[in-house]
Structures are given as C-alpha cells and as structure tokens.
Amino acid sequence: MRAHRRFTVHGDRAAMQPELRPVWSRLVDLLARGADDPNEPVRGISRHLIDRAEALLLFADVPGVSPTNNATERAVRKPVLWRRGCHGSQSERGLRFAERMLTVTATIRRRGENVFDYLVAATEAVARNRSPPALVALPTAR
C-alpha cells in the first residue's frame, strides 16, 4: 500500500490518514456483510473484528504505534523455534514455566538488559523473602 510505504519512509501520519479512509470504509462494509454471513467462521471473525474496529486503525492516529506486527512476529520467533525443537512440555506445570520464562527472557532482552543478571536478582530476592525486580514499570499514582 502506497500510504504505508510513504509513512515508513517519511513518518508522515497526516498524509497517510486520507488515503486510509476509502480502505477503512470498504473494510467496514465487508465486515458488516460478514457479520450476517451464513458461514459461521466468516460471521465469527467479522463480528470479532467489528468489536475491535477502533484498534484496527490505531496506528494511523497514535504516534509510536506501528502499522505492522513485524516487531511482534520477530519477538515470538525464538520461542516458537524453541518449542518446535523440544516438542513443548509434558505437563501443564511445565507449560506454565516455559511460557513464563519465555516472557521474562523476551522482556529483559527487549529492554537491552542481561537475562542471567535478572534471573539471579529475582532468585536472590525470593530466597530472601523479598519481591523480585519488576519486569515492567508500574504506573505511578498522580
């Protein structure tokens, strides 16, 4: 799409927005038709997307929101390859451990910090009956 390319090259959201209007209008029309489709999967996904319509164009209005999910796709690539290579887990407890560790490692790496250092600090905190270091910054009260 020309609008997306122009945005990624020039970073101009204002120029992209008018080009998205006809596309958005067409998408809304298709989803409205799909919401009444006799085929249940078509009906289901259409209704699902209608319920989340505001989020579909969030990238057009909000700075910092990417118009693609490329960063997310890259973030889950290593865990997916790991899971395929080791065939997952044999228990529910193992699955929970793996998903939590993969989340922790991805978050720490994304922050540019050392995963091992974080895990040592978290383990020491628990051993000393203290709260582990936060993975994400919690909002402060205003």
Image (cartoon, rainbow, N blue to C red):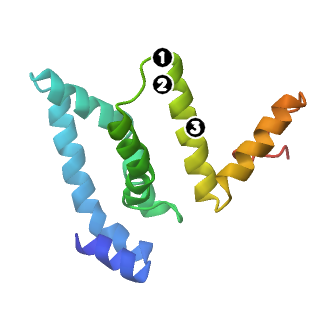
Q: Which quadrant holds residue 100?
A: top right
- Mark earlier in primary sequence (1, 3): 1
Element class at badge 2? helix
Look at 38% across and 61% down and name the residue there: 67
Element class at badge 1? helix
Q: What is the x, y in percent for residue 97?
A: 56, 28
Quickly name the residue at label 3: 101
Quickly name the residue at label 1: 92
Q: Examine the rendered structure and indicate whether residue 20 appears above or below residue 132.
A: below
Residues at discs 1 and 2 in contact (Cβ within 8 Å): yes
Quickly name the residue at label 2: 95
Where the N terminus falls, by quadrant? Answer: bottom left
Q: Is residue 106 left or right of residue 9?
A: right
Q: Residues within 10 Å of mark 2 (few under 14, many from 20)?
A: few
Q: Is residue 86 left or right of residue 36?
A: right
- Inter-mark Cα distance, 3 to 2: 10 Å
Look at 39% across and 29% down and name the residue there: 88
Let me know if residue 45 appears in the view. Answer: yes
Q: Amino acid at mark 2?
A: Leu
Q: Amino acid at mark 3?
A: Met
- Inter-mark Cα distance, 1 to 3: 14 Å
- Mark earlier in primary sequence (3, 2): 2
- Inter-mark Cα distance, 1 to 2: 5 Å
Q: What is the x, y in percent for residue 90?
A: 42, 19
Q: Examine the rendered structure and indicate whether residue 62 appears above or below residue 40.
A: below
Number of numbered discs: 3
Q: Examine the rendered structure and indicate whether residue 26 appears above or below residue 100.
A: below
